[in-house]
Structures are given as C-alpha cells and as structure tokens.
Amino acid sequence: MRKLSVKKFKENNKKIVFILVILLIISVPISVYSLVKPPTTSNQITDNNLKINTSFDYKATIKPNVLYPDGGTVEVGDTIIKKITTSIPVDLKSTINSENEVIAKGSTEIQLVVKAADLWERSFSLAEKQTFEHKGTEISILDSTFNVNLEEVKTFIEQVEEETGISPDQYSIEIVPNILGSINYEGKERDFRLEDRLAFQYNYNEITLASEKTFSSETPFISSEVITNSFTVFGVALPLILVRTISTIITLILLIVLIYTNKNLLLNRNKPIRSQVDKINKKYGNRIITVSQKMNIDLKSIITLSSFTSILKVADEKELPIFCHKIHEDGTALYFIVDGDYVYNYETIKSNLIHSTDKGIISDNAYANG
C-alpha cells in the first residue's frame, strides 16, 4: 500500500490543527460563559402592593382667657400653651390600602405614655383593647378621637415628684396606638405591628410637638419566579445547563485531540528517517551477505539491474547469495550477485534524492518494483 508523502502528511496535519484551533476558539468562550452565568435566575414579582397609613390630628381645649375669651377647642400649631390648656383631643386614623382585596384582622389598644427623660415612664389606657376583621381594598382599622387630660397628667407628675423628690427639667407624653394583626391575600399571610406614636415635649410652660403626624409603611406580597437561563444558537434557545455540559465536553475533547495531534506531528518530525539501505537490510537481512571490500569486477561482465526486486528474482532463480557493499560516504550501497563471469548488481539511490528530512515519508516503491 502506497504511503503518504511527508509534505502531504504535514499539510493534512496543519489543516486538522487549524480546524481544531478554530473550533476551540468558538467553544472556549461559550463554555466559560455558561460556567460563569447561573443556570437559573430568580425574579421577585409583586403580587399585591399594600400600604398602611396612620395619621394624627390634634387640637387644644383651653380655658377662657384674654387670648380666647370663649375658651373651647381650638386649632393650634406645634406649640400648646400649657397654662391655659386643659386637654388635647387627638383624632387618630389608621387604614390599609391594597391594590387587590385582602382580609385584615387583629386588635387595637390606645395608650398614653408619660416619660421623665431616662428616669421612668408610665402607661395609661386611652381606649380598651378591641379586635377587628375586615375585607376589602380600603380597610379602616382605627378612626376615633381620644382625649389627653392634661390636668390628670399634671396631677400624676406632681405626685411622682413629691414622692420621689426628683423633678426632671423635661417630660414627654406620647399617644401610642398598639395595633397587632395579620393580612391575608390569596392564602398568603403577613403579620404586622404598628407602634407609630404622636409625641410631645412636656415643658414647664408649653407643650411642643416632637414627632411626625403621619406615618406610612408598605407590606407587599411578593412571590419568586425561577427562570431557566438559555443560550441562543442559530436562533434556537437552549437551556444553559445543556449548553454548559455540551460546550465543556467539546472543549475537553478538542484539547485532547489537539494535544494528541501536535504530539504525533512532533514525534514524526523528530523521528529519524530510515534510508533505502536500512529498509532493504531489515527486510531481507537473512539473505544478504555484507562484504567490506568491493569485488574486483574488471574481468566480469556487469549487468546492472533497475531495482532490488530484480536482484531477488535472479538470486532465487540461480540460487545464489546476495552480497552488499556499503558506500558510507553518500549513504548508498551496492547489491550484487556473482554468477561465474557475470555480475548482477543494483546500486541504491542516494538518500537525499528519495526523501527530505522535512518533507515526508519514504515510499517503498523505490525498491519494491522490479
């Protein structure tokens, strides 16, 4: 069987390596991308927006005086004159506003908290504990008016000062609606606790607002949606896990084949090329007798043959040995048969004429045809 030439062998290997490198350049970024990017993404979806609003509004009930001869309940700003004020009516509203219908249930309890800086605090009930359960998109939890009796607060503070002997420079009073409950939306439940408070600084001559009057909090109902990330190839979206597996396997296979191909190419490049003489002697060494000197053939009839197979044919027909005389200077050898006055010989071709060290594989046809 005829072998490929060295040149053709190298050209084919270069083409294979080139194709492998191109495929590797394509597969590596895809593999890295699929490994870095998570196979799934979790998106947060708001199923229902829900807001709880609490607002306070207050006035002052005052005794008749030079400023307000008729007395009564009047509108006031952030500062209330304590000496002429007997109580503070407070309007409290707390509502739930939802995009979709919900069920809200729980309990409410309104307290008045009196504090003496960091020394002490005392709670008083402004409204007993009550329960509620409502359904809808606009739910009223509280809508009432509570009265803070400043005369009772003053009496309590004076009694504490008298019994403890401590008179802080500043007190504070707070209206605290303790609201506990839960909101149910399509089987999902959210608990909530509201302690928004209206606070005042209770000084010697005046009572000053010390907090906001409106409060708002959101309790959205959120669900998670898991999305399988994909990679689009030629318009077709493939799951990222599948792309990751396939691209990683292809990359590893390409690397292995590329390493194997380059290794074989390097081995073939470094592999010493046997000469024609070496090949003949290896194949037919048991029939060849090597001689160190060239026979004197001046008185012989020389018959030059064109191939080594012709030598073999003559040797078989005449049952004669084959002699070999190596010509070391140029890497050739002379094979001959002595038959009386006749000498049949064949001289091998110089090695640099039948192959090149950088262009291929030797063909056996140099001596296989007779």
Image (cartoon, rainbow, N blue to C red):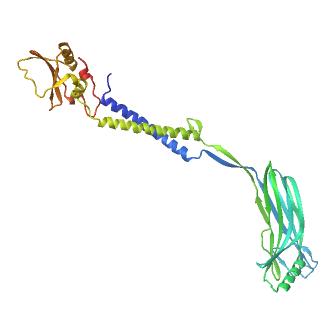
Q: Residue at x 40, y 37 (%)?
A: 260
Q: Nearer the viewer, residue 79 or 109?
A: 109
Residue 270 occupies quadrant: top left
Residue 356 occupies quadrant: top left
Quarter the N terminus occupies? top left
- The answer to whether residue 141 is above or below residue 90 is above
Give how far across and how far down residue 31 sits, in percent: 52, 42
Number of numbered discs overlaid on the protein picture: 0
Give how far across and how far down residue 212 sits, in percent: 78, 68
- The answer to whether residue 17 is above or below residue 67 is above
- The answer to whether residue 169 is above or below residue 178 is below
Q: Is residue 143 left or right of residue 288?
A: right
Tell me if residue 115 can be seen. Answer: no
Give how far across and how far down residue 167 sits, in percent: 80, 85
Give how far across and how far down residue 5 sits, in percent: 30, 28
Tell me if residue 219 can be seen. Answer: yes
Q: Is residue 163 left or right of residue 353?
A: right
Q: Residue at x 85, y 85 (%)?
A: 163
Q: Nearer the viewer, residue 89 or 253?
A: 253
Farthest residue in the top direction?
317
Q: Residue at x 80, y 72 (%)?
A: 199
Farthest residue in the right direction?
70
Residue 94 occupies quadrant: bottom right
Q: Nearer the viewer, residue 209 or 46?
A: 46
Quarter the C terminus occupies? top left
- The answer to whether residue 270 is above or below residue 145 is above
